[in-house]
Image (cartoon, rainbow, N blue to C red):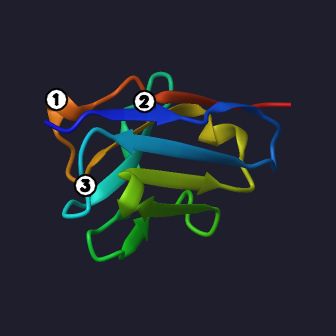
Amino acid sequence: QVQLVESGGGLVQPGGSLRLSCAASRNIKLYAMGWYRQAPGKQRELVARITAGGTTNYADSVKGRFTISGDNAKNTVFLQMNSLKPEDTAVYYCNLAPPRTASWGQGTQVTVSS
């Protein structure tokens, strides 16, 4: 199974930006990849997805603010998050899309607060 390590989270003020990274243990260029998030008391949700061909899809709540991209040479997937809102506060995870149970990592905490 591919192992995934997320990084780049932190505390940011509303309206700010963060760039999350997801490093994979092996080549992922044939897979669709996704960024997911889980807020306290809520179910984990898919917020952005990129196919092997580069097609992207976004949840309505982040459309126009978040951008998913990948660097196949580095086996890394990114999530650029702009115009962050308090409701974006969550632990963010990357995984294949659809996700593989054994590939969930520790996630990276994003907190949007003034």
Residue at coordinates 56% horizontally, 58% vertically from top-left? 62
Dividing the picture into quarters, in which one does residue 13 lie? top right
**Disc with the residue nearer the chain's start (3 vs 2):** 3
Q: Circle 3 — which element?
A: loop
Q: Amino acid at mark 3?
A: Ile
Q: Which residue is labeled 1 in the image? A: 102
Residue 110 picture location, percent across and down: 62, 32
Kindly give the residue lying farthest to the left in the view shown: 1
Q: Circle 2 — which element?
A: loop
Residue 21 picture location, percent across and down: 51, 44
**Side of 12 where 5 appears, left or right:** left
- In what quadrant of the picture does the C terminus appear? top right
Mark 1 crowd level (few <14, some 14–19, many ≥20, 10 Å Cα): few
Q: Which residue is labeled 2 in the image? A: 42
Mark 3 crowd level (few <14, some 14–19, many ≥20, 10 Å Cα): many
Residue at coordinates 46% horizontally, 34% vertically from top-left? 6
**Disc with the residue nearer the chain's start (3 vs 1):** 3
Q: Amino acid at mark 2?
A: Lys
**Disc with the residue nearer the chain's start (1 vs 2):** 2
State the residue in front, 5 or 80: 5
Distance Cα–Cα, label 3 vs label 1: 15 Å
